[in-house]
Structure formats: C-alpha cells, structure tokens
Image (cartoon, rainbow, N blue to C red):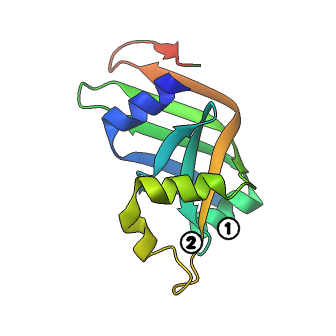
C-alpha cells in the first residue's frame, strides 16, 4: 500500500470515478492517508459521490505525476466503521474541520478499496503492479 500512497502523494490531486445511473462521474480529490496497512480516502456524507459509492461501490482512482507516469487503482469502496479513520483524516488536514463539524452537520466518511489492483503506467510503456 505504501507504493500506492506514495504515488498519490507525489501526484497531489487524483480523480475518482463513480456512476450515477448510467452516467459516469469523475471528480478530483486529494484527501487520503495510509493507516493500518490501507490507503484511506475521505469524502463527505452530504455529497453525491458518497451516495453513488453506497449504491455501487465499484470505483477507480487515477493519478498522474509530472513525469508522465500515471496510476490506475481499481476496486470496491468499503466504508470504515471505526471513527478513528475519519478523525485521523481531519487531524491531517485541519482546514477540513471548517466543513466537517457539528455546526454544519457534515460528516467525513472514510473508505478504502478492497479486491483492488493498482498499476503504474509509463506514458509509452506497459503497466507495473504496485500491490
């Protein structure tokens, strides 16, 4: 998992794909961390992306580095039941507490990917597994 997390750190922004009915949806994200041997991602419980992953947890994350290498991380989103993951995500990005707090009623939802594959691909090369 460290290779996946390191790639995401170097890329900065990554894109998460879901579906809404029969329409693909893609959005940029940045909230992630490595904890307990998993790469954890964070999204808001009030967002469409959360509802889409609840309905269909199959997802794909794509990140690109400046050197042209890119990563495809594919799997099933599994939401964490232990609040420690969401709290750690907020501790790592304190500015997010302005969005996720008791006053707003918004809750950070943490998830990881299971049954996942992760491949790093050079611009004109073949993929190499990161898992």
Q: Position of residue 4 (x, y in %)?
A: 49, 28
Dot 2: within a 10 Å radius of its alpha carbon, few (fewer than 14), some, or many (20 or more) residues? few
The residue to which callout 2 is attached is: 47
Q: Residue at x 35, y 47 (%)?
A: 13
Evaluate if marks 1 and 2 touch, with contact meaning CB atoms under 8 Å apart.
Answer: yes
Taking the view exactly as shown, the residue that stands out farthest to the bottom is 103
Q: Nearer the viewer, residue 120 or 12?
A: 12
Left/right of residue 109 with respect to residue 61 in the rendered view: right
Q: Residue at x 41, y 51 (%)?
A: 30
User: Measured along the vertical axis of the image, is residue 65 above or below residue 55?
Assistant: above
Q: Is residue 27 visible?
A: no
- What SS does tag 2 mark? loop
90, 4: nearer the viewer: 90
Q: In the displayed structure, would residue 58 be above or below residue 55?
A: above
Residue at (40% x, 29% y) in the render: 7
The label number, if any, that marks residue 51 in the structure image = 1
Q: Is residue 28 visible?
A: yes
Instruction: Specify the label residue 100 is tagged with.
Output: none
Where is residue 121 shown, x and y percent of the image? Answer: 42, 20
Q: Quadrant of the C terminus?
A: top right
Q: Residues within 10 Å of mark 1 (few under 14, many from 20)?
A: some
Camera-nearest residue between 120 and 112: 112
Position in image of residue 100 (x %, y %): 51, 73
Instruction: Locate the N terminus by quadrant.
Output: top right
Q: Position of residue 102 (x, y in %)?
A: 56, 82
């Amino acid at each position: 998992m460290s290779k996946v997390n390191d790639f995401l750190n170097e890329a900065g922004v990554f894109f998460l794909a879901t579906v809404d009915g029969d329409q693909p949806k893609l959005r940029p994200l940045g909230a992630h961390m490595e904890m307990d041997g998993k790469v954890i991602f964070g999204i808001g419980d009030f967002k469409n992306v959360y509802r889409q992953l609840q309905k269909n947890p199959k997802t794909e994350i794509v990140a690109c580095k400046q050197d042209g290498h890119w990563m495809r991380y594919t799997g099933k989103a599994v939401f964490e039941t232990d609040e420690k993951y969401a709290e750690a995500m907020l501790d790592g990005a304190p500015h997010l507490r302005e969005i996720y707090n008791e006053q707003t009623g918004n809750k950070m939802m943490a998830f990881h990917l299971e049954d996942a594959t992760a491949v790093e691909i050079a611009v004109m090369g073949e993929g190499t597994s990161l898992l």
